[in-house]
Every structure is written in C-alpha cells, then in structure tokens.
Image (spheres, rainbow, N blue to C red):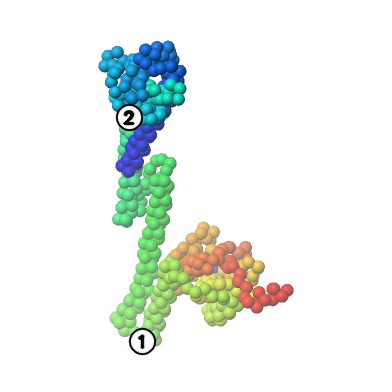
C-alpha cells in the first residue's frame, strides 16, 4: 500500500508539472506574439497625424499581418474610437479596463488566461502622436486550437497516469501475493522447527533474498537435526555406559548379601564393587569434561612448558606400564612452550599415553617426543600396540567409539578419551592426526602454535 501511495503521489505531481509547463509555454508564446502584433499596430498608429475613427480603421485594415479576433482603438481618455467587432460594438463608449488605464499611463500590458478550453489573450499599448500620448490600441484573441492542445495534453497525461496506476496496482497485488505466499512457507517451516520437526526443507523458486533465506534456513535445520541426533545418541550412550557398572555393582552386592561366603571371597567382591565405582567416577569426570567443552566454557590460557607436563604424566603412568611390561621413552626438546587453557595439555598427553599403554602388547614400547619448529610445537605419541584398523580410523575421535569393545571395557575405557583430546586440541588452536605405523602400532601427532618465552625472545634479539 505504501508503495502504491508513493507511486500515485509521484504520478499526480508529474501530471501537475506537465500541465503547468505546457500552459506556461503556451502563455509565453502567445504573450510574445500578441505583444509583437500590438507593437506593430501602435507604431503604425503613431505615424498618423491625428488619431480618428477613419484613420484608425484605415491603418488597421492596411496591416495584413496583424490577426486578432478583436481590435479596439481608444483616444487619450479611454473612449473607444474604433472597434473591429460589428456586433456589440463598444465604439463611443468608455473602456475602463485596468489594462487601458495602465496603457494610458504609458505601460504595455499583455494578459493571458486559459478558460473553458480556450486560450484567451489581450494586449494593450499606448499610441503616441509625436511626443504626446493620444490613445491606446487593444488586441483581443481567443485561441481555441491552442486551448484544445493544452486540454488534450492534460487529458492524455491523466489517462496515461491512470493506466499506469492500474498496472502498478495489479503488479503490486500480484507481487505481494506471491511474496506473501513464499514468506508464509518459510514461516510455516520455522514454526514446524520450533515444534521440534527439523526434517522439513523449504523449496522455493526464484533468484532473490527469500531463496537465500530459505537456503540458510535449510542449512540451519540440517545442522540442528544433526546436533539433535548427536545429543540423543550421546544421552543414550552415556546412560548405557552408566548402566553397565551400576548393574555390576548391584549384582556383586546381591551376591555378597545372598550367598554364604568366606571372608576372602567377600573381600574380592567388595574390591570388584570398588573397581566399578572407580570406573563410574572416571566416566562421570569425562562426561563433565565434555560438557564443559561443549558449553564453550573458556578458561584462562597460560603459557605451558611441555617438559613439565610430560614428566608428570610419565611418572603417573609408569606403574601401569610396568604392570603390562611396556617401556616408556621420552624425548622433549628445550623451549617447547604453548598457550593452553586450564590443564588441557596434561589431559591431552595423559589420554594419548594411557591409550598407548592400554592398547599395547606385553613387551611393547611407547615413545613420546616433543619438538618444535619456528611456528609449531609437535607432540608425537607412538606405540607398538595392536594398532587401529583402517576402517576405524575415521571414527576414532567420535564419542563412545571403541574398536575392540571388550578389550576397551576390560581396560576401563568408555571411548571418550580421544574425543576429549580432539575437542581440547581444537579449542587451543591445534591440530591432531593419527597414523598407522609401518611396522606395528599407532602414532598420534598433535601440533600447536609455538609460543616463545621472554628469555627466548631476548636471546633471539641479541643474536
Ligand atoms: N594407541 C592406540 N592403539 C590402538 N587402539 C587405540 C589407541 N588409542 C585408541 N585406540 C582405540 O580407540 C578407541 C577410543 O579411544 P578412547 O581413548 O577414545 O577411548 P577408551 O580408551 O576406550 O576410553 P577412555 O579413554 O574414555 O577411558 C579405543 O577403544 C581403542 O579401541
Ligand atoms: Mg583412552
């Protein structure tokens, strides 16, 4: 409607402008022509020795170029001494128009007006005989032809404007109906999505912003659908993982209660219950860790020296490695410092090394190397373990994914360690890669941007 109102206002203005311009042009042409004619006549009359009815009539008739509907000549008091109009002749009467009064005061007066589709014009001028003002001459002309032209022009412009207005109105109605229909489809889909249906895709044709909006919406719906599926999967996996140790605890506790057991067996059962409780604690810790990462919680980043981290992890995992007859070798270069949030680096190194021990073979080895280039610090954790099959490689960082479920569960794993590592590496601006070793085992390579410490910067600037 707003669009329409603006268009109609523009057309209306255009109409008025065209009409006014047309009239002004016609008036100006007519004024010039009438002034020239009156001038010609006044000059001719000025050449007379005396101004009288006869001399005036003779002069008017002698000038053929002057065409006007009516010509009147007055004396110096304004009395008409000659009138070309035979009927209603004003001859002998006083012509007391304002134009004659002004002409008697030595002024040229030309007047134009448009009335009843006729362009009416009147030119009045003083006449001098010698130096003396002896009368006036007054020319009147009604130009119906020009009047009709102005009229036709106004009518045509109005008609064209009306047709244009109707076309614009029709176009606006069709356009807004189409637009609203497409808009309603988008709105419909948004409502469905609000109700939890993410499968609905908007299909609209065209080449405008609505199509872009629909595309963006479809992508958003796809993403939400995927994340909703993931969330459901996560909840179901997590409850399954929680259920297993709880069921074991229940079974073990029932056995202790219901069966007559010697003290040794009871100790064994209670020890198993403790083991399951430990597993539950580890699981809930990892779930909490994941929730923190998913919630995009940002902890303060600090400059971490990887030497300290690797030492701590090796110290902690050495007993486990010894139990399984696995040798650990570490090699950390100087100046391997990176910026990392909280204790992310510790968790990353711990999880990778723990896996290297858990999925190793007796008598195997685990190597951790930390080195750096100008730009990056590179951590490699490689083992001589069971390795990861080719088809499992792409799933390795997914939540709750385990290659050998039985082995992993026996080792107390829930399949969350690597996904936590992956997310932590990402949130600290690093990258992670996994490769199968040529001989046997697996190699994880993690890379972070290298951060120089103050003393290193000083040494570099000196050198
Ligand atoms: N170094 C490795 N060698 C062989 N297989 C591995 C290695 N690291 C991981 N895997 C496989 O990838 C799976 C996922 O590892 P991830 O660390 O995510 O889980 P997990 O060790 O089973 O449990 P969690 O770490 O949560 O206690 C493991 O179950 C294992 O099958
Ligand atoms: Mg693990």
Q: Residue at x 36, y 86 (%)?
A: 262
Mark 2 surroundings: few (<14), some (14-19) or many (≥20) residues within 10 A = few
Tags 1 and 2 in contact by the CB under 8 Å rule?
no
Q: Secondary structure at mark 1?
A: loop
Q: Which residue is mark 2?
A: 98
Q: Residue at x 47, y 73 (%)?
A: 299
Instruction: Note whether residue 336 is visible.
Output: no
Sequence-wise first label, 1 or 2: 2
Image quarter of residue 387: bottom right
Q: Residue at x 41, y 23 (%)?
A: 127
Residue toward you, 177 or 224: 177
In the displayed structure, would residue 82 be above or below residue 132? above
Q: Secondary structure at mark 2?
A: helix
Instruction: Note whether residue 24 is visible.
Output: yes
**Farthest-out residue, bottom:** 263
Q: Give how far across and how far down residue 88 sits, in percent.
A: 26, 16
Image quarter of residue 451: bottom right
Q: Which mark is residue 262?
A: 1
Q: Give how far across and how far down residue 82 sits, in percent.
A: 34, 16
Q: If the image is split into quadrants, where does the N terminus sit?
A: top left
Q: Give how far across and how far down residue 22 sits, in percent.
A: 39, 29
Residue toward you, 179 or 348: 179
**Farthest-out residue, left:** 88
Q: Give how far across and how far down residue 325 sits, in percent.
A: 57, 77
Q: If the image is split into quadrants, where does the C terminus sit?
A: bottom right
Residue toward you, 306 or 433: 306
Distance from disc 1 to disc 2, alpha carbons, whole Å, reads 140 Å
Looking at the rendered image, the disc whose residue lies closer to the viewer, 1 or 2, is 2
In the displayed structure, would residue 170 be above or below residue 455? above
Q: Residue at x 37, y 16 (%)?
A: 52
**Farthest-out residue, right:** 463
């Amino acid at each position: 409607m707003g669009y329409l109102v603006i268009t109609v206002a523009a057309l209306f203005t255009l109409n008025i402008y065209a009409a006014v311009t047309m009239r002004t042009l016609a008036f100006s042409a007519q004024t010039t022509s009438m002034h020239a004619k009156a001038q010609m006549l006044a000059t001719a009359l000025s050449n007379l020795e005396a101004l009288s009815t006869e001399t005036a009539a003779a002069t008017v008739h002698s000038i053929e170029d002057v065409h006007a509907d009516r010509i009147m000549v007055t004396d110096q008091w304004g009395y008409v001494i000659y009138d070309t109009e035979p009927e209603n002749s004003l001859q002998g009467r006083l012509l007391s128009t304002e134009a004659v009064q002004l002409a008697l005061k030595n002024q040229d007066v030309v007047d134009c007006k448009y009335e009843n589709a006729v362009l009416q014009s009147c030119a009045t001028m003083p006449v001098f005989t010698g130096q003396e003002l002896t009368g006036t001459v007054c020319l009147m002309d009604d130009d119906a032809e020009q009047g009709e032209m102005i009229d036709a022009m106004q009518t045509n412009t109005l008609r064209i404007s009306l047709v244009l207005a109707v076309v614009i109105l029709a176009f606006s109605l069709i356009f807004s109906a189409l637009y609203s229909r497409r808009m309603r489809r988008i709105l419909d889909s948004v409502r469905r999505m609000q109700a939890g249906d993410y499968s609905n895709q908007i299909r609209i044709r065209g080449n405008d912003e609505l199509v872009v909006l629909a595309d963006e919406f479809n992508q958003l719906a796809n993403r939400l659908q995927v994340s909703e599926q993931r969330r459901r999967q996560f909840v179901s996996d997590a409850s399954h993982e929680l259920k297993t140790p709880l069921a074991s605890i229940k079974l073990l506790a029932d056995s202790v209660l219901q069966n007559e057991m010697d003290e040794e067996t009871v100790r064994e059962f209670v020890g198993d219950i403790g083991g399951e409780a430990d597993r539950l604690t580890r699981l809930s810790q990892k779930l909490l860790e994941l929730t923190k990462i998913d919630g995009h919680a940002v902890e303060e980043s600090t400059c971490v020296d990887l030497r300290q981290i690797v030492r701590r992890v090796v110290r902690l995992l050495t007993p486990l490695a010894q139990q399984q007859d696995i040798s650990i070798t570490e090699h950390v270069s100087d100046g391997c410092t990176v910026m990392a949030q909280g204790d992310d680096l510790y968790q990353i190194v711990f999880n990778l090394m723990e896996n290297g021990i858990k999925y190793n073979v007796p008598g195997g080895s685990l190597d951790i190397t930390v080195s750096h280039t100008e730009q990056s610090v590179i951590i490699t954790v490689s083992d001589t373990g069971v390795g990861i099959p080719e088809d499992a490689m792409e799933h390795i960082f997914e939540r709750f994914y385990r290659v050998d479920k039985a082995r992993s569960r026996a080792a107390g794993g829930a399949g969350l360690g690597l996904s936590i590592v992956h997310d932590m590496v990402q949130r600290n601006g690093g990258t992670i890669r996994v490769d199968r070793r040529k001989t046997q085992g697996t190699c994880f390579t993690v890379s972070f941007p290298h951060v120089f410490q103050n003393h290193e910067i000083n040494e570099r600037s000196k050198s």
